[in-house]
Amino acid sequence: MKHKAEHSSTTKLLNYFLIGLIVFLGLVCLYLVSFLAPGSRRSDQEASGFLGSDPVLQTHDVDDFLQVQDLNPEAPRSIPICDLRFSELIPCLDRNLIYQLKLKLNLSLMEHYERHCPPPVRRYNCLVPPPSGYKIPIRWPASRDEVWKANIPHTHLAQEKSDQNWMVVNGDKINFPGGGTHFHDGADKYIIALAKMLKFSGDKLHNGGNIRNVLDVGCGVASFGAYLLPLNIIAMSLAPNDVHENQIQFALERGIPATLGVLATKRLPYPSRSFELAHCSRCRIDWLQRDGILLLELDRLLRPGGYFVYSSPEAYAHDQENRRIWNAMCNLLRRMCWRLVVKQDQTVIWEKPLTNSCYLKRERGTLPPLCSSDDDPDATWNVSMKACISPYSKKMHKEKGSGLVPWPQRLSAAPPRLEEIGVRREEFQEDTSIWHFRVTEYWKQMKSVIQKNSIRNVMDMNSNLGGFAAALSDKDVWVMNVAPVNAFTRLKIIYDRGLIGTVHDWCEAFSTYPRTYDLLHAWTLFSDIDERGCGVEDLLIEMDRILRPDGFVIIRDKPSTINYIRKFLTALRWDGWVSEVEPRVDALSLTEERVLIARKKLWDDGIMKM
């Protein structure tokens, strides 16, 4: 009996062990299936205690998977695909994330439209898919007036602004008649009217090339900026991802320079003295809030003698509330030393002073005050706005202006502010010459695959002095020059050349929609972020997000970095066409370099279902 009891007990233990083993193996299989499934991830409760879940992988999950792949270098790589509902994902401008993280933001100050990036455990490490039916964008210049509806399947703006000629749905396309909230009859006529108000020669707003850089605040679908381009004026068209949530996406799809941004609590990511003209047409901004801090931000950005064009009911309406706002605004701008140039119909234009003289003549204690001498007006990344006036440098005050030559000579002339960053005129000229040669070689390398007008929206991810963009001046493209945070001081040189750009930290996602750019250029960028401890894989996935299908990446870096990046080309679907060369060594070559050019494929239904 004792042996039978022991045998029965042993049998039960064995059964329990086998059942436990089966359950354990089942859980392991379930984990592996969920881990390898495209766009899947474990719950947020497991990851970080957050409620809810996102259909993406955690950072360390992707890294672990890629490390496993490294054990077999011949094995095909795979990066998960995000769920289709994330086809318009902007990771650092994701309002759902704000709600889930329960961030305490001041809605009245528009903080919820500023950048709030996901923590590492919630990073989107998957490839953002295009919407169903996506087509290669219509090419410039035809794209100024029409885009494919399937690429941005949102038509509410056409209905909401039907009386203002913003946009019209026309079958499988969306047309842009060139209208706006204030200029129903077309931006072109409105621009001529502004030039007449300012009495510029020939009714040309460029004023002989002296007006080149414009900031358009609350730009809508950027028709104002679109119709400035024939005048050789380039506008940074700016709007938040608000109730008109796709306005900037439409602008970029049209091939018009534009970016997501908002006048809220942080400085805009542009250096001081960058624009000759700022424009606000029915932009619905409370300029008087917080002691005029938003107007003071425009003041920081305007060059000496710069203009502020304001078209709004406060400028012409006679009701009590609008009269109150108008009087208060005039009083504030008078204390800021701005001069009222002209007021006509529904538009008023102010001019900023050329020197510090007016500031020095104000009575003691006049508000707003001058900023302290230790404030750097060019520092912008995550820097709060300040309710003070940024005075001019001694040199700019003495010269009574920026000292810039008119466009297009401005592009190649050495800007006066070079000395502020310790760059000699000879270095600047050599940089310009080298980049002209480099870009010529790039285009030779792509000659067999590049088509006419196939490239319009371009980004230089590490812009230095703007030489890459300057070398493209003979092509019908525009360039978003990006100064990494550790080189922000150089961005003012780019603006002084008549180009545009922004400051950015490439350890984070960029503030733009997916499928924005036709070409991304990254010179030594991967080596830089690797030294900062940021993930190369994260940057590649972000580049894929903002790159259009059929678009190109040009990566110039150390051979070891290029070799590492090549491993990801198939997983990223960047193997539509690949070329790699060893370029000529020049004065900008910090070390041995290689140039990798790859083309992103247009995804088909088979890839989407993987």
Image: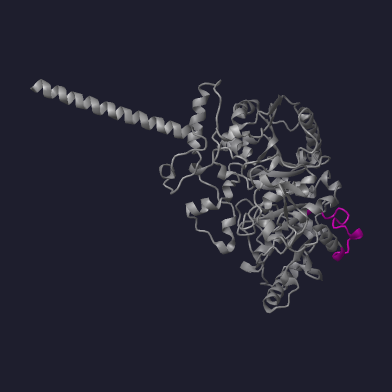
Considering depth in this image, is 278 or 113 the residue closer to the camera? 113
Is residue 227 visible to us here? yes
Please say whether residue 212 is one of the residues in the magenta stretch: yes
Quarter of the rendering containing residue 76? top right
Q: Residue furthest right?
A: 202
Q: Residue at x 28, y 26 (%)?
A: 18
Q: Is residue 412 above or below residue 95?
A: above
- Asked whether, in this view, residue 485 is left or right of residue 5, the answer is right
Quarter of the rendering containing residue 45? top left
Position of the C terminus, as image quadrant, is top right
Considering depth in this image, is 65 or 351 the residue closer to the camera? 65
Number of on-image labels: 0
Q: Residue at x 80, y 58 (%)?
A: 187
Q: Is residue 537 above or below residue 580?
A: below
Position of the N terminus, as image quadrant, is top left
Magenta span dominant secondary structure: loop
Image coords of residue 473 (percent x, y): 82, 41
Considering depth in this image, is 125 or 510 the residue closer to the camera? 125
Please say whether residue 55 is one of the residues in the magenta stretch: no
Quarter of the rendering containing residue 391? bottom right
- Asked whether, in this view, residue 281 is left or right of residue 540, the answer is right
Image coords of residue 19 (percent x, y): 28, 29
Q: Residue at x 67, y 49 (%)?
A: 249
Image: magenta residue range: 196-213
Q: Residue at x 68, y 29 (%)?
A: 576
Image coords of residue 269 (percent x, y): 66, 52
Q: Residue furthest front?
A: 171
